Amino acid sequence: MTREATSGPRAVLREGARLATFAGILTGTTALWEADRRRLPPERHEARKEELRHMTSRGILKTFGVQLHREGAVPPRTGARLVVANHRAALDIGVLLAEVGGTFLSRADLAEWPVVGRLAREADTIFVDREDRSSGASAIRAMRRRLREGGSVMIFPEGATFVGDEVRSFQPGAFIAARGLPVEILPVGLAYPPGTEYVGVSFVEHVRQLARRRRTDVGVVVGEPFAAEGRPAEIAAHAHRVVQTLTSRARALSSRS
């Protein structure tokens, strides 16, 4: 991250304009969904939510100057899908929503954040407090219901955000939700410029840092889906190895930009 990209009057103006646009997108999407929920029949609600998730994430990525460098195609979803990726920045959520789609497993406190929390709740986000066993069990049940219904759920099995391209061990808990169900695992590797990771700062400061950058190049590599067969720990270990390989390829993609 260079000083030219994150300091000076232009960076300050860029930050202010982007944050205002970001807030406008979130509030606008919330208002649009409130209107659509009343207008559309209940059987159309889920499809409309997916449309809004995609539209909103695309708008946010454009607002923050995100340039995606892609490899691999997302196959059409024919049934339940569990999307697994490494976790580095708040933008991960927007990238996966824009490229893959579905609903997220997220940290519990996000539900209480102003505007963002309300939109996350309306988007059917599954919340989990990783320090609370009962919360974890409830989240697994909610994920399992979603998968049993043939839905798509996105998770970051590292359990937190980290710096660099080393993918930390995947926690097997989330994979319990797929046990015994016909679920495909779709692995994704992500790579960001050094200094853009959500580590050691508040969410607000992290977003401000991203907003100051002229552009942020993100490598995104989608792997081949595989069946969720075996014990959860075995699935987690295999998914970890695959995502590590994809992340290394994503780094090569973003480095060529």
Image: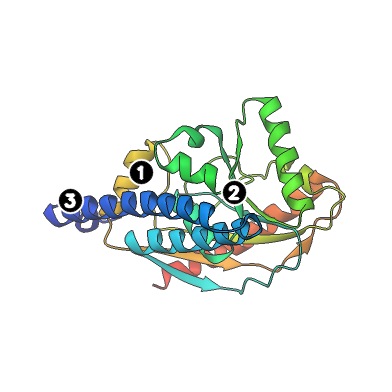
Q: Give the Cα distance between marks 3 and 1.
A: 15 Å
Tell me the SS state at disc 1: helix
| Three-letter code, disc 1 | His
Q: Position of residue 81 (x, y in %)?
A: 72, 59
| Three-letter code, disc 2 | Phe
Q: Position of residue 116 (x, y in %)?
A: 43, 43
| Three-letter code, disc 3 | Val
Q: Position of residue 135 (x, y in %)?
A: 66, 29
Which of the two residues, 247 or 211, is positioned nearer the viewer here? 211
How busy is the neighbourhood of tag 3: few (under 14 within 10 Å), some, or many (20 plus)? some
Marked residue nearer the N-terminal end (3 or 2): 3
Does 210 appear above or below 250? above
- Left or right, residue 77 beside residue 109: right
Which of the two residues, 224 or 40, is positioned nearer the viewer here? 40
Name the image quarter holding residue 76.
Answer: bottom right
The residue under the point 67% across, 45% down is: 170
What mark, if any, has residue 12 been given in the picture?
A: 3
What mark, if any, has residue 197 been given in the picture?
A: none
Does 173 appear above or below 165? above
Q: Which residue is mark 1?
A: 206
Marked residue nearer the N-terminal end (1 or 2): 2
Marked residue nearer the N-terminal end (3 or 1): 3
In the picture, the quarter occupied by the C terminus is bottom left
In the picture, the quarter occupied by the N terminus is bottom left
Q: Give the Cα distance between marks 3 and 2.
A: 32 Å
Q: Which residue is mark 2?
A: 104
